[in-house]
Amino acid sequence: MKKYIVKILNENISVNVNEGDHILKGIARYNSSHKANGCRNGGCGVCKIRIVSGEFEVKKWSKEQVSDEEFEKGYALACRVFPKSDMVIEYIGKNNKK
Ligand code: FES
């Protein structure tokens, strides 16, 4: 199975994400008590990230957590982003904007 490496810049770690899995799954495998662990359903916002680079697909999430405008600026939810290449991200967390 293909694995992608997702580097979390502001935490200085890299996690492996299997093809077809969302980024949060890789983060949780690396550290099951990471702050990003939440609903895994695009609703709570604790897994908010900013995508720096890489290819990916997304599934629907609550616009209350990440609006379309924010998504255009690179914000997303780790539980709804499925890597299609190695990626570089920053962890943001709930309602934290940079
Ligand atoms: S874990 Fe709740 S929105 Fe991602």
Image (cartoon, grey):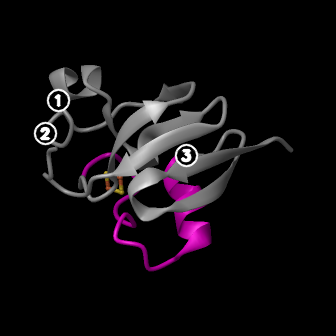
Amino acid type at circle 2 is Glu
Which residue bears the numbered disc 1? 67
Look at 65% across and 37% down and name the residue there. 86
Q: Would residue 45 be counted in the magenta stretch?
A: no
Residue 98 in the image: state x and y as whole percent.
Answer: 16, 44
Which residue bears the numbered disc 3? 22
Which residue bears the numbered disc 2? 64
Q: Residues within 10 Å of mark 2 (few under 14, many from 20)?
A: few
The span shown in magenta is 22-43
Residue 13 in the image: state x and y as whole percent.
Answer: 54, 62
Q: Are marks 2 and 3 in contact (CB under 8 Å)?
A: no
Nearest to N terminus: mark 2 or mark 3: 3
Q: Residue furthest bottom?
A: 33
Q: Are marks 2 and 1 in contact (CB under 8 Å)?
A: yes
Between the residue at mark 2 and the residue at mark 3, the CA separation in whole angstroms equals 20 Å
Nearest to N terminus: mark 3 or mark 1: 3
